[in-house]
């Protein structure tokens, strides 16, 4: 089935220039009021595509196509050039798990408790059933697919056939994407822990406890792992032994995966703030306040930090100061990280649309 994407007049999607609003170094800045959000500015929208349900997943871009999962049960493949739908794959329930592409296959989990391998032509390769719903995105490495389930387990599946090579009991619900380096993997759980796993056999090496849930993918930087918890803290721990290096206190729960670049950790929290923290010391560099709570990871591309919020706004920020270059408004929450490829930002929104934005 092929559909033509919509091209909106941009009435509710406006760009706000950095001269109007922005953050302040070391102090919480704030975006302006509704009048500033509604100001007409040069249009950045190249195209938009409307699905039949909300889209809470980070777009995966490969081979000239954008791939997203939707709460309408489908995984979509769209042309990057104009948003034309090339195929859709129907699962048995909502898709909250962001697709991962490796080689000529796409991997995704579903609320129907299944992991799917789908060819980039839209045909199913294999499917494996777990014992509960899947919200975690898959991770691929060394001919395996690693994925967590609400059954409390982390699974290692063969990429080729979907055979379960091992599974390990993490506890709680595993909604965190696995982060990998060499033979090590790191994954969080709703039981408040971050676990280090030997990827060769699934043996747990150590476990670090927080006071609440760990919902998102940790970041690996040199000899440490950085991650957030809904206990309002961002942690840096030694990736070999799990010893704490530092913790950074915020005023809201953290479900955003951290992004680390050039010695700085970027993440958002549920109190609408984006934080920039020194990765070595845990000291704040700046923070700024957006319009809604932040669930998705900040995306850093071409010296711009892109962050979506629950007010439906995508913010393009200066990574050095937190000041805004521009903002773009959708009609519902943006809870997934934007994906930037070749000067185009692909944004999924809970208004059921995928947007392609010119970010040159």
Image: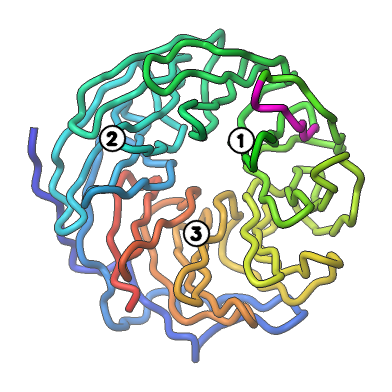
Residue at mark 2:
104
Q: Quadrant of the N terminus?
A: top left
Residue at x-position 49% and y-position 34% = 140
Which secondary structure, mark 1? loop
Residue at x-position 20% and y-position 60% = 47
Q: Is residue 345 left or right of residue 124?
A: right
Crowd band around label 1 with a 10 angstrom C-alpha radius: few (<14), some (14–19), many (20+): many
Q: Decide which of 130, 39 is in the foreground and name it.
A: 130
Q: Rounded to the nearest whole Å, what is the CA distance between mark 3 and mark 2?
A: 29 Å
Q: Nearer the viewer, mark 1 or mark 2?
A: 2
Looking at the rendered structure, the number of numbered marks drawn on it comes to: 3
- Residue 19 x, y percent position in the rendering: 49, 91
Q: Nearer the viewer, mark 3 or mark 2?
A: 2
Q: Are marks 1 and 2 in contact (CB under 8 Å)?
A: no
Q: Rounded to the nearest whole Å, what is the CA distance between mark 1 and mark 2?
A: 21 Å
Residue at mark 3:
308
Task: Tell which circle, 3 or 2, labels the residue nearer the N-terminal end.
Answer: 2
Residue at x-position 33% and y-position 38% = 103
- Residue 197 x, y percent position in the rendering: 72, 28
- Residue 150 x, y percent position in the rendering: 61, 19
- Residue 178 marker: 1
Q: Decide which of 263, 182 is in the foreground and name it.
A: 182
Task: Tell which circle, 1 or 3, labels the residue nearer the N-terminal end.
Answer: 1
Crowd band around label 3 with a 10 angstrom C-alpha radius: few (<14), some (14–19), many (20+): many
């Amino acid at each position: 089935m092929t559909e033509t994407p919509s091209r909106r007049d941009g009435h509710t999607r406006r760009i706000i220039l950095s001269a109007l609003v922005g953050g302040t170094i070391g102090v919480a800045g704030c975006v302006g009021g509704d009048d500033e959000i509604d100001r007409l500015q040069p249009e950045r929208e190249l195209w938009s595509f409307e699905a039949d349900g909300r889209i809470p997943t980070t777009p995966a871009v490969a081979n000239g196509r954008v791939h997203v999962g939707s709460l309408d049960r489908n995984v979509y493949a769209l042309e990057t050039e104009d948003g034309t739908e090339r195929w859709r794959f129907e699962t048995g329930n909502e898709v909250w798990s962001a697709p991962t592409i490796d080689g000529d296959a796409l991997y995704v989990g579903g609320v129907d408790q299944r992991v799917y391998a789908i060819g980039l032509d839209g045909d199913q390769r294999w499917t494996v059933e777990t014992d509960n719903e899947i919200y975690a995105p898959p991770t691929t490495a060394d001919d395996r697919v690693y994925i967590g389930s609400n059954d409390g387990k982390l699974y290692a599946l063969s990429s080729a056939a979907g055979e379960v090579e091992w599974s390990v009991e993490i506890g709680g619900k595993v909604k965190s994407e696995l982060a990998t380096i060499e033979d090590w993997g790191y994954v969080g759980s709703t039981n408040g822990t971050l676990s280090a796993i030997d990827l060769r056999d699934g043996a747990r090496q150590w476990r670090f406890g927080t006071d609440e849930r760990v919902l998102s993918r940790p970041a690996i930087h040199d000899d440490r792992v950085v991650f957030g918890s809904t206990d309002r803290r961002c942690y840096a721990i030694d990736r070999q032994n799990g010893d704490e290096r530092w913790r950074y206190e915020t005023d809201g729960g953290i479900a955003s995966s951290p992004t680390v670049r050039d010695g700085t950790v970027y993440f958002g929290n549920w109190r609408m703030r984006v934080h920039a923290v020194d990765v070595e010391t845990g000291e704040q560099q700046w923070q700024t306040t957006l319009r809604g709570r932040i669930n998705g990871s900040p995306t850093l591309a071409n010296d711009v930090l892109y962050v979506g919020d629950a007010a439906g706004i995508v913010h393009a920020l200066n990574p050095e100061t937190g000041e805004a270059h521009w903002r773009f408004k959708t009609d519902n929450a943006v809870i997934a990280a934007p994906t930037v490829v070749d000067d185009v930002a692909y944004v999924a929104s809970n208004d059921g649309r995928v947007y392609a934005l010119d970010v040159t």
